[in-house]
Amino acid sequence: MKLLVGLSGGVDSAVAAWKLMQEGHDVTCCFMRNWDSLTNADIEGNPDLTNDICPQEQDYNDARAVADHLGLKLLRADFIQEYWDHVFQTFLKEYERGRTPNPDILCNKYIKFDSFFDFATSQGFEAVATGHYANNRQEDGFVWLTRAQDRNKDQTYFLCQVPENKIARTLFPIGGLTKPEVRRIAEALRLETVASKKDSTGICFIGERNFRLFLSNYLPMKPGPIVDIDSGNVLGEHQGVLYYTVGQRKGLNITAHKG
């Protein structure tokens, strides 16, 4: 098959691309650029962020190194506007309502399995492939999303809103592998750039930055007292209700009162 593989600059998608090559597919890679750090408010008041290479650009460099090492062509597609409209705006609205959003689910639904699919189709590819830890299975004419072999890394939850017709046109090459196996393959292939690279965690457009500081660029802080409903005691001060979620215990900076 003529496949377009989403190459993220991480070890999972790198090994996924290699496995597809081994299976005899016609493989091309594509790096998705979804966030423009240098033109958004997340660098306001943080000039140092413009002095070093952006994490997203580092990921692109790593993806380029993998593609070159495997002898594969690497495309680059920008979905910045789509990400802003369908993922980030929803992310902000959910925080304003006091809810905790999951941008990864939205990113898969609207970007990786929608905009990316449209791009792949426009370029003449038959199907796409990703480095997700997931599988799919056809049964009675319907293609089901199924769990990965590595239950500790299973990502089907983050793919829960992807429609069946997109799952049917997606290959998950590492769905039958465990994370340690993926890293061992990368090491054996001498993919030094990604073999021991730390897994990405948290929200992609925030990275290692202070979450509250980042969010304050878009949703202004409105400080107020933290009050014990039962006793009426003021336990501390919050920076804005929307920065906290129900059940949160860490980072409240409150003082316990007796009696």
Image: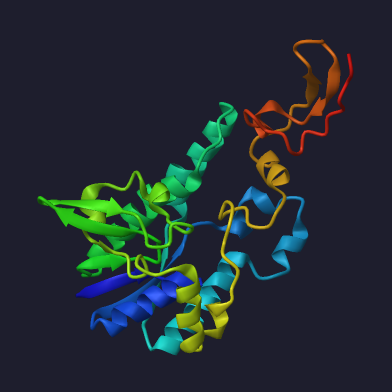
Q: Position of residue 158 (x, y in %)?
A: 42, 49
Name which residue lies at 38% across and 89% down: 71
Name which residue lies at 43% across and 82% down: 67
| Residue placed most toward the observer, 36 or 248 | 248
Instruction: Tell me where residue 123 sits by quadrant.
Output: bottom left
Q: Position of residue 65 (x, y in %)?
A: 50, 83
Q: Position of residue 183 (x, y in %)?
A: 50, 76
Q: Position of residue 256 (x, y in %)?
A: 86, 25
Quarter that holds the N terminus? bottom left
Quarter that holds the C terminus? top right
Name which residue lies at 56% across and 26% down: 97
Q: Kindly give the residue lying farthest to the right in the view shown.
A: 258
Instruction: Tell me where residue 232 sits by quadrant.
Output: top right
Q: Is residue 75 above or below residue 44?
A: below
| Residue 8 visible from this viewpoint | no
Image position of 148 (left or right of 52): left
| Residue placed most toward the observer, 167 or 150 | 150
Name which residue lies at 34% across and 44% down: 161
Q: Is residue 255 above or below residue 92?
A: above
| Residue placed most toward the observer, 257 or 42 | 257
